[in-house]
Structures are given as C-alpha cells and as structure tokens.
Amino acid sequence: MAFTISVNGVSHTMEVDADTPLLWVLRDVLGIPGTKFGCGVALCGACTVHVDGAPVRSCVTPVSTLGTKAVTTIEALGETPIGKALQQAWLELDVVQCGYCQSGQIMSAAALLARTPKPTDDDIDRTMSGNVCRCGTYQRIRAAIHLAAK
Amino acid sequence: MPTSQHASEPSRLPDRRTFIKASVAAVGSLIIDLAIPLGECPALAQTAPPPFAPNAFIRIDRQGVVTLVMPMVEMGQGVYTAMAMLLAEELEVGLDQVRLEHAPPDDGLYANPLLQSQITGNSTTVRGFWTPLRQAGAVARTMLIAAAARRWSVDAATCRAERSEVVHFASARRLGYGELVDAAATIPAPARETVTLKRLEEMSLIGKPIKRLEGPDKVAGRTEFGIDVKLPGMKLAAIAISPVMGGHATSVDEQAALAIAGVRQVVDIGEAVAVVGDHTWAAKKGLKAAAIRWDDGPNANVDMTTIVGQLEEGAKRTGAVATHQGDTDAAFAAAAQRVDAVYQMPFLAHGAMEPMNCTVHYTKDACEIWAGTQAPTRAQNMVAELTGLPKSAVTIHNLYLGGGFGRRLDVDGTLLAVKIARHVSGPVKVVWSREEDIQHDLYRPYYYDRISAGLDADGDPIGWSHRIVGSSVVARYLPPLFKDGLEFDVIDCAAEIPYGCANRHVEYVRVEPPAVQTAFWRGVGLTHNVFVVESFIDELAHAAKRDPFAYRKAHVTHPRALGVLALAAEKAGWGKPLPARWGRGISLQFAFGSYSSTVVELEVAEDGSVKVHRIVCALDCGIVVNPDTLAAQFEGGTLFGLTAALHGSITLKNGRVQQSNFHDYRPLRMSDSPAVETYLVKSVEPPGGVGETSTSAVAPAVTNAIFAATGVRVRTLPIDKALLKSSPPDTKDVRP
C-alpha cells in the first residue's frame, strides 16, 4: 500500500504494508537513522519519536495509523526551543556515554517538558523510566532535564 | 567542532601510503622522490594533500587539519576523548582543532600494548596508551618545531608549540602546522623514547574535565553506529538462530516467506535462517511466515540442574593452584573458629542497547564489513579463515558501538553475517532482534565457589582456602594464555586479595557448560571474585563480632587500599544510625591497577524488595586523564553491576535460554536508580583501569548492606527477594 507521511516537515510517499512500524519506515525506507531500534516491543524507549507532539514508541506504531499527523524525530528536535535547551543541557552535563539510547531519552524528555515545564524528580522518574540506558546515565539525565527546565 | 569519520573515508581520500602504492602500480616501480612536494601536482593537490604522518596516530594536512586516529573503539567509556587528550596534550593542538578517525584493523600499528592486540577491553585503553600516545604527540611536535626552527634559522630550543602553531617568541614569528607539514615530513622522526614529555604540572588538558568530543553528534542523533550503516543497494536481513546451540533448521517455508511484499530471499545455513528483504519489517514478517522447524541436536535436554550439577561435581575435585602460601592445613587445624560458604553467580547476558548487527558485502574476491567491534583484527582474521580469502581482501570498517560490555569482543555475529552474505548479491545488513540478541548472547559464566577461613581467638583470619569452579573465557578466546589449567582472568581478585592472611590457598577447576558459550562481560574474573571475597570478608567480620569496615581496615595491606576504604566510609557516614531494615554495606577491591571502595545504603521492604538509596564510591586510579568521564564510568558501571545483582540471570530449560527481552532480562530503570557519588583520591601513580571496576564493587556492597539490614546472607546472585521477607530469626542466615 502507498502511504504519505510527514516527517520533520517533509512529506514522504512510500509503498509498504500497512502494519509496518514507523521505526523501520524511518530507518530503512527513508534513511533517517537517528531513531534507534532497541527492543521492538515498546520496552526500552530507544525508538521514541513525537507524533503531533506526543511521545510514541515508533517500533509499535504502524505507519497506517499516522495519517496526516506530524512526525518529529531527533534530527529535527534541535529546531525547537525545548529540544535545543535539552541538547545544550545534555552537553553541559556530558550526559551521553555510548549514546545509543539518547535520541529516545531526549525525545521523551522533550515531551515531558512540553507538558510539565518545571518537573519534579518524581515527574522525571515517572516519565523517563520507560527509557532504558545500559550505560547508566540516569542521574545525569535527571539533572540535565532540571537544567533545561531552568 | 570536531567531527569523526569511519575508516572507509581514507580509501576515498588516499593517504600517502595508498598514494605511493597507487603510483607504484601505475609506473611499475617506486621512482617517486618523496621530497618532491606532491602538492605541486594540481590534480593531486585537490584530492590528496600529502599529510604529515609521523606515526599511525597523527596526520596533518596543508590546511592544518589535524586527524587523530583512534586505535581503541568508543563504546561509551569515553576513550575517544581520553586518547585525543593524550595525543593533543603533547602535540599542542586544541581539541576543537582535531578530527577523529576510527583506526583500521592493524595489530602492527594499533595493538593495545597491554593486550598485544587491537582489542578494546579489560579496562586497558588509558593504561596501555598513556605513554605511547603522549610520545606519538611529542614526536610530531618535535618535528614540527624543528621544521619551523630550520625555516627561521633559529635554535629549536627557542621555539615552542601552542594551538597548532610553532611560535618563536623572541621574533614574534608564528607558523601554523599546516604551513610546516612538508618541511616536517623531511625531518627524521626522533625515537619515541627520546622525546621529552610534559611533567604533570605542565599539562593543560590531562586532568581537566573535558567534554566528550563526540557528544554534540550523539545528542543530535548524528553518530553513525554499526546498525546505522546505509549502502547503495543494501538489503536488510532478519535472522533466527537455532534456539538450542548445536541444532539446525529442518524445515523452512520459503514460498510463504517470499510471498511477503519486500522479501527477496531466504538463506538457510542450518544453524540459522535469514530472510532478506528491502527493509527490516519485510524481513521480519518473512521470517515469521517461514515457520521454521528445528532439530534441537545434542543439547536438547540441558537445563540448569545439568549445569549446576556439573559445577557441584567440579567443586569436589582439586584444581590448578593459583596461590599457595604458608600452611593452610595447619592454620585450619589451629583455628578457634571456621567459616565455610558456597557462592554462586549466574550466567549474564550483555544487553547492549544496540542489538547485534553486521553489514557485509561479499564478492568472490573480497569481503567488506561494517560493524562496531571491540576486536577488529580478530574479526578480520576469523573472516579470512572462514572464507579462505587473504586477510588483505577482508576490510573492516569500524563504527561507534551502542554499548560493548565485552559482547563485541566476540565476532560470532560477524561470522554469521558473512555466512549469510555469501548467498546474497550486494551488501546485506543483518540485524538481530532483541530476542535473538539475548538468547544467542555469549554469557558471563556461571560460577560456583567454595570458600573457607579459619579465624584465631581474636577473630583474625589465619587460614584462607578458595576453590573457583566454572568456565574459562580466556581459554577459548586467547588459548595461549591458558597454561597449566590457569589463566589471569578467572582468578583475578581472588589469587591476590587486599587483606593480609599468612596461609592462603586458591585454586581453579575448569568446568565448561554445555549448550552455551561463555564470554567476557563488564569484568569476568573480578565481577565474580570480588563478590565472593568481599562477601566472605564480611562474613568473617560478623563471625569475629566486629564492624565490617573496622575489620577490613585492620587487615588491609596497602596504604592506597586503606585510603579509599576510609574515604568511602567517611563520605557515606559509616556508623551513623539507620532505621530498622535499613543497612549499609561496604566493599573494597584492587583491580586493573585501581583501588576502589563502595558503600551502599539501602532499605529492605517487608516483602523482601530492595530499595537502594545511596551509593558512595571512593577511587584511587592513579593519574586521572579526564575526571568527568571517569566519574561517569563509575556512575554507569555501578548501575550496570547493580542491575546484575538485583535482576541479572540467564537460565536454560530444554537447552533454550528462557529470557528474551527487557521484561525478563531486566535492566535497571531511572526510578530504581540511586545517584552514585564518586570521590577521587589525588595521585601521581600511573593510571589504572576504571571501565569495569565499579561494576564488580557494587554487588557485595549491596548484599553486605542486606545482611546489615536483615541478618540474611545472600550467597547466590541475583538476590532472591523471597529470602528477604520479614521473617522470624530462626530462618535467617540461610546457608546453601
């Protein structure tokens, strides 16, 4: 089936099965690789993107459910004030280690700050506990979200 | 902003060596005079500026672009920044003036001096390259200064280098490195042992908290990991590996797979089946449609009773002697008190966030490979062996690793991808599902340890006997290092301990498990031995009715060990009262040349669940190159160890690994993760390793804290919370 979706403000048309997850459309079909594959079943958050501003796990989001909604990925997040502030805070506190999960971490954090501009530790823990980091950068992520919220 | 490129770039932009080779091929013999400034040839000036390349780590071109070649790989541990700091410190360039490049596989040029191979592991990068990389920078600087001094006709001693320029202060003259490369290239390189290295107090980068050079790319999703490789005409493959090791596919519905839109090919190599498609989803659907049936082979009935049973049997045998000092038999006979224990540690998967993957373009004459690997030369050698191609025909393009933890020291994933790619026309990227990644990992071995001590009337240890039983990863991975039944890793932190005891005997019995292959992890010997030794010393303190910190303090033999122990205890507020069912535990270790001590403060709920509130680490790892990434290693490595202690276990049933994804091989999440406080001891000793030491230190500190909170001694990992439920005293102190 042919689908037309909007990713980072650009419209793309492709021929894929309706159940194809957005993750594989982004990575394999469109060649936009910043969104990562981690678990395939929405357990780790590495594939988090925004759909009309809401965080979704792209590995379980079929392309057919997107319609005209706007998909935003890490590649374009820096164009928003919240995204930019988060990336700056991430650099300021040198959060990343291997960095593989960090696209998803930052996307989840951006959705949190859009909803809750001054989150508490509990707000952060609640929202961010869906994103796994095996390098163990959690305490710096927590601090960086507070820093970006300032 | 520094940028990075993988090693395929130089093949498009020939360096001097490839240019020479090309020229030889063109003219039939080497008649090029290297003193001729090649840049005067216009065609070449555009495509191949001849770099100044005084050694394998540094290239500088006429525009002054400084390229630093990274011999070890970046998997989160911060070594790209640390290695760049070592080079830049002596080369006198700013870190904002360099670009980084992954080294190609070449043991001759890029072997880690401590491992004699181009292997990133065993916490050796900074330890191994501390001197060679500074020397490499100093050699290049010396040559650039000599070139400038010659140009100005001044004494080189009156010139100095700073931020990619040579400066002659007396005449206020300056020349950029780019302007000096041609002249510098004609100066004979001084022997690296002869160049003067800066004293610690002269250093401007080393010791400073420098931000990661690849950070800006990583926060913007621009970093290219192995899994991100994209090549023209590339296909994607999903794989199913025989669920039981040693089994093979008996039926594959190829037609059903090919009926899925986007599926191009089914490749059955027996041990695994791959479905190749235009994109991963098509390949995954094709794999499901293929409805593969398996013959499980000889391991079909292996389960944990088989494996643990073999270890228990092994524990009855005597092993190869790692340490024997004094007379343990006499010491035990004379002891006023004897303590015996058995400790068991599970198989552990790695669970790196980037699932296993490898991209291969196989043709009849060559095999080109893209992957994030900790062992590029091993990959190259083993692919050459597998395919019969000469090593020179096997190209490895290394990329950033989305976590390594020892998993990417093994090249099974590369070999499997090559076996599949042999049947595929054009490049193919093989990506494992998370389930395949966990179920076909190579695991940190299961260990079974018997340990005993004899205490004198004061409770001090006079006899110590420890038998380690389990797999030797080194015997498989580096066979020449396994001699007389022993190797360095499996007895690490057990053969030598930080405490004095006159009569000690430590031995190792090798027992290899069926149905799984064992591998390195974030520390193997030390993750298991530190748990055993640091739990047991706590048991001895308890038997001696003494405080665990005071008991350790009384028996440590090295002032640096005492230093970290005391610092951790002080920062953690050791001895301050805690509520009921709260406890503090401490551990101490000397590993990879670094001393560290960890204190954990936790609470055990009535239902037995453990909530860790605070972790304090004190570390003396000698000279610190980058204090901020070092603290990050401690924060992250501690959580890696805490994850394993609380949740980590791979088990087998009917030859199959029972865990499959992050719901049953649970990583710690943010809500469970305490902040880790790291305190550094200032030191002028040579650098020690830190990537793995925090991981091993935390588990015994946790179980010791559990003992302090509940009186229950946990001797088997992961921690079984059923043992920790609030219960009457007579069920406490459970011994296996």
Image (cartoon, rainbow, N blue to C red):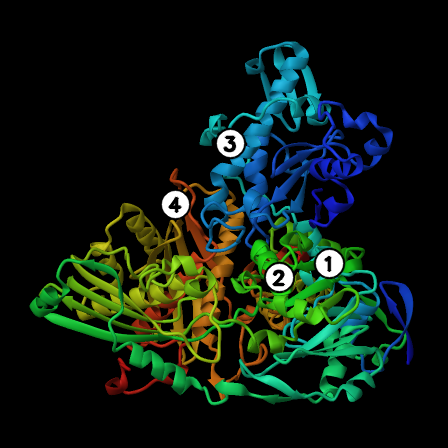
Tag 2, which secondary structure? helix
Q: Do the residues indicated by labels 1 and 3 lie within the same chain of the protein?
A: yes
Task: State left or right for residue A146 relative to residue B707.
Answer: right
Q: Nearer the viewer, residue B38 or A20?
A: B38
- The chain identifier of the residue carrying mark 3 reads B
In which quadrant of the rendered view does residue B157 lie?
top right
User: Residue at image x 64%, y 49%?
Assistant: B104
Whole-number angstrom distance, CA of label 1 to CA of label 4: 55 Å
- The chain identifier of the residue carrying mark 2 reads B
Between label 1 and label 3, give the one nearer the viewer: 1
Q: Residues within 10 Å of mark 2 (few under 14, many from 20)?
A: many
Above/below status of B81 relative to B316: above
Tag 1, which secondary structure? loop
Instruction: Tell me, for residue B383, which label it has, or none.
Output: 2
The amino acid beneath tag 1 is: Asp
Instruction: Tell me, for residue B203, which label it has, or none.
Output: 3
Q: Do the residues indicated by labels 3 and 2 lie within the same chain of the protein?
A: yes
Instruction: Tell me, for residue B365, which label it has, or none.
Output: 1
Whole-number angstrom distance, CA of label 1 to CA of label 3: 49 Å
Task: State left or right for residue A126 relative to residue B452.
Answer: right
Q: Which badge, 3 or 2, comes first in the chain's sequence?
A: 3
Q: Quadrant of the N terminus of chain B?
A: top right
